[in-house]
Image (cartoon, helix red, strand yellow):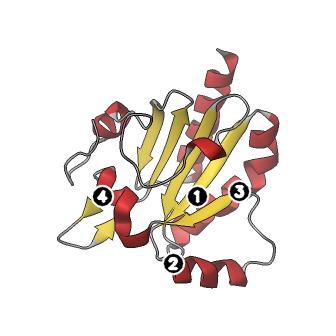
Amino acid sequence: MNAISPSTTLDDLQRINWAEANLPIDWRSALGERGLLIVIMHGTWCHACLDQIAWLQRKHAWLNEQGVGVLAVAMDNSWQVEAFTRTLAAPLPFSLIADEGAALGRALGLYDEVRRFTRSATLVIDREGQVRFAQVDDHTPLEQALLTRVIEQMLLR
């Protein structure tokens, strides 16, 4: 499955094989040593999304020790990402790339053409390109705890 409808569900996201899909990003280079990657799609202007980024910054050392990579994809153009990174007190410990023209949002079916907006998402991808976990539009501490538990369970396999 390469692209899906704008009314994407979690099941739709989990059926996409990133290795087979024609996605506009190099996700493999961000894979961790254990072959897992957290991809977070967010807006640099979204307070809840920024809380998720801050949480990932705090968890990054642990994730790195566990062999889990992190890739942040901003629902912004590159000039917006550059402006955002200049405001940070310290550089992010993981890559932050711009989703120019919402290319990835469209490829994943997360872009709403009517509202001209990409829904935020957090995904865990394995080295084969399978989506092992997906959250959409949710960045609460409860969801962060769920993501941590899911990663811990995957690492035990």
Mark linked to residue 94: 3
Relative to 79, is 3 on the left or the right? left
* Res 119 seen here: no
Sequence-wise first label, 2 or 3: 2
How far, Cα to Cα, is label 4 from label 3?
23 Å
Pick whichever, 2 or 152, lies toward us.
2
Name the residue: 23% across, 45% down.
Answer: 4
Residue 87 appears at what percent x and percent y?
A: 70, 84
Local SS, label 2: loop
Q: Give the number of the mark in front: 1 or 2.
A: 1
**Sequence order check: which comes first, mark 4 or mark 3?**
3
State if disc 1 and disc 3 touch (CB < 8 Å): yes
What residue is disc 1 on?
Answer: 72
* Picture residue at 50% right of the left edge, 73% below the top: 46
Left or right side of 129 for 72: right
Q: Which residue is mark 4?
A: 106
Q: Residue furthest top?
A: 157
Q: How many marks?
A: 4
Q: Which residue is mark 2?
A: 45
Residue 121 got which mark? none
Label 4 packing within 10 angstroms: few (<14), some (14-19), many (20+): many
Tell whether label 2 touches label 1 (CB within 8 Å).
Answer: no
Q: Residue 116: where, in percent of width, then height?
A: 26, 73
Mark positioned earlier in the residue sequence (4 or 2) = 2
SS type, badge 1:
strand
